Image (spheres, rainbow, N blue to C red):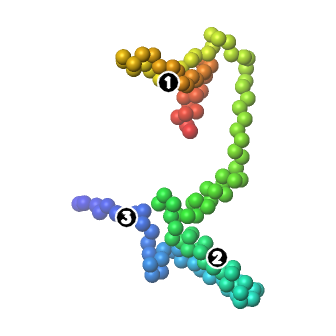
Amino acid sequence: MQATVPQFIDVEDRIIGPLTLKQFLYFVTAGALELVYWFFFDFSLFILVSIPTLAIAAAFAFFKINDRPFIYFVLAVIGYYFKPVVRVWHRRGSKLTARDIIAVSFLEEEEGAGPKKDLLKAHMKRGQLDHIERALETA
């Protein structure tokens, strides 16, 4: 007996006409705000405030950035501004000696081209390579 494999599992179901449930709820929320605007503002201010509200609801419902819904972009922007950005590194332990430092060159010599100058050097303390490796693997 063969089992059927589901297809198109990443496509949301269309619930109300051509809209998904999320899209419909965005427009219902915008409609509720429009109703509040209608009762509290005069007509000119109602029009002035309702157009951006509907534009934002349409952006949340239909606009995608890198095939991801617009709400994820907005949440990422909010998270960027509210999370700390400055990272301070404090070295622990004693000072490094010349014996403890390893110079790592990232450029190799090409055949026949002669030696190239090292453009980038990284200095790592011996014994910390395992710690750096673990940090890179878990990042």
Nearer to us in this view, 52 or 35: 52
Identified by mark 3, the residue type is Phe
Lower position in the chain sequence, tag 2 or tag 3: 3
- Where does the image place residue 65, in percent across and percent down from the top left? 51, 60
Answer yes or no: is residue 15 visible: no
Q: Quick check: marks 2 and 3 in contact, CB under 8 Å?
A: no
Residue sitting farthest toward the left:
1
Give the residue at x 71% y 32%.
89
Q: Quadrant of the C terminus?
A: top right
Crowd class of label 3 (few under 14; some 14 to 19; many from 20; radius 10 Å): few
- Disc 2 from disc 3: Cα separation: 32 Å
Residue bearing the label numbered 2: 53
Question: Which comes before the other along the chain, label 3 or label 1?
Answer: 3
Q: Which mark is residue 106?
A: 1
Q: Image quadrant of residue 59?
A: bottom right
Residue 15 relative to residue 4: left or right: right
Q: Which comes sooner in the sequence, label 1 or label 2?
A: 2
Whether 90 is drawn above or below 125: the answer is: below
Q: Which residue is mark 3?
A: 8
Residue 114 lies in quadrant: top left
Q: Residue at x 57, y 69 (%)?
A: 60
Tag 2: amino acid: Thr
Q: Amino acid at mark 1?
A: Phe
Which of the image's four quarters has the N terminus?
bottom left
Foreground disc of the pair 2, 3: 2
